[in-house]
Every structure is written in structure tokens, then in C-alpha cells.
């Protein structure tokens, strides 16, 4: 289906649903592929997005991310922390390296990108 034939609100929900389904399937099938910037089965030539709600001990944040293929299996990724409770530290793992995330940002040349939140020394799962 061409991108311009789908209303943008429906397209966003469909993209998010496909991305969520891809991550869930990857986790169920071994977890190793869950860290890829784009879930398998999603059109590799288009920009995609998903939002994940992360919680630890009743506190948490929602982190939305997008990934746009740039060629050779690399992506330009963006993120935005859209909701957060006090004392939550959002983190991103970019190609194996963990970093604290600002409220929003971007990186290029990324193959794997997942997010989580930490409260003190406890952290949510990567998603």
C-alpha cells in the first residue's frame, strides 16, 4: 500500500501497530532481534514510529521514537520523552552503548536502538 493512499491518522496507528507487533514477535522468538531499529516485516524504505510506556515501581515515562533508513542497514533515529514522572531517568541503547536520553534528540548511523527507564538502581526492560 502506498504511503499517500492512507489517511495520516490511520497510517500512524498502523505503523505503530506493525512496529509493536514486530518487537513483540522478536521478543517471543528469542529476543536478539528486538534491539533492531526497525522490526522485521516493516517496509524498510519508509520512516516508522512507535511509543513505549516504561514503568518501574509505579513510576515511568513514555518514549516515542522514529527510525528512517539511510542505507546499508543504518537508520536516522529520533526520540521524544512525552510523559514522565519524578525521578525517572530515560535511557537509550544505541548499537550496544547505553546513554541517558534528553527530552528529545536524534542520532544518525544507528543499527540498533531501544529504550527503557530507570528509577534509582531499578530499570524497566528494553523495548
Image: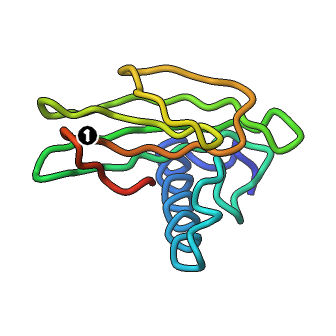
Q: Is residue 96 above or below residue 81?
A: below
Find the residue positioned furthest to the bottom.
29
Q: Nearer the viewer, residue 53 or 44?
A: 53
Q: Quadrant of the C terminus?
A: bottom left
Residue 42 lies, with reference to residue 88, above or below; the image says below
Residue beneath the point at 40% across and 35% down: 91
Residue 106 occupies quadrant: top right
Count of numbered labels shown in the rendering: 1
What is the secondary structure assignment of the residue under circle 1?
A: strand
Residue 54 in the image, given as x and y percentages of width and height: 29, 49
Quadrant in which the N terminus is drawn: bottom right
Give the vertical position of 127 relative to 8 (above or below). Answer: below
Left or right: 30 as drawn, with respect to 126: right
For the point 75% across and 54% down, the residue is 43
Identify the residue shown where x is 55% and y is 28%.
78
Check disc 1 and report the residue beneath it: 61
Q: Is residue 17 left or right of residue 88?
A: right
Q: Quadrant of residue 82?
A: top left
Picture coordinates of residue 46, whole percent (x, y): 73, 43
Amino acid at each position: 500500500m502506498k504511503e499517500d493512499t492512507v489517511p495520516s491518522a490511520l497510517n500512524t496507528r498502523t505503523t505503530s501497530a506493525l512496529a509493536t507487533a514486530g518487537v513483540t514477535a522478536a521478543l517471543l522468538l528469542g529476543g536478539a532481534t528486538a534491539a533492531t531499529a526497525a522490526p522485521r516485516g516493516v517496509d524498510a524504505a519508509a520512516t516508522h514510529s512507535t511509543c513505549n510506556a516504561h514503568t518501574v515501581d509505579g513510576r515511568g515515562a513514555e518514549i516515542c521514537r522514529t527510525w528512517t533508513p539511510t542505507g546499508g542497514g543504518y537508520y536516522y533515529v529520533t526520540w521524544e520523552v512525552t510523559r514522565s514522572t519524578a525521578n525517572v531517568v530515560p535511557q537509550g541503547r544505541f548499537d550496544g552503548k547505553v546513554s541517558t536520553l534528553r527530552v528529545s534528540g536524534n542520532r544518525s548511523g544507528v543499527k540498533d536502538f531501544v529504550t527503557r527507564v530507570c528509577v534509582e538502581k531499578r530499570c524497566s526492560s528494553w523495548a
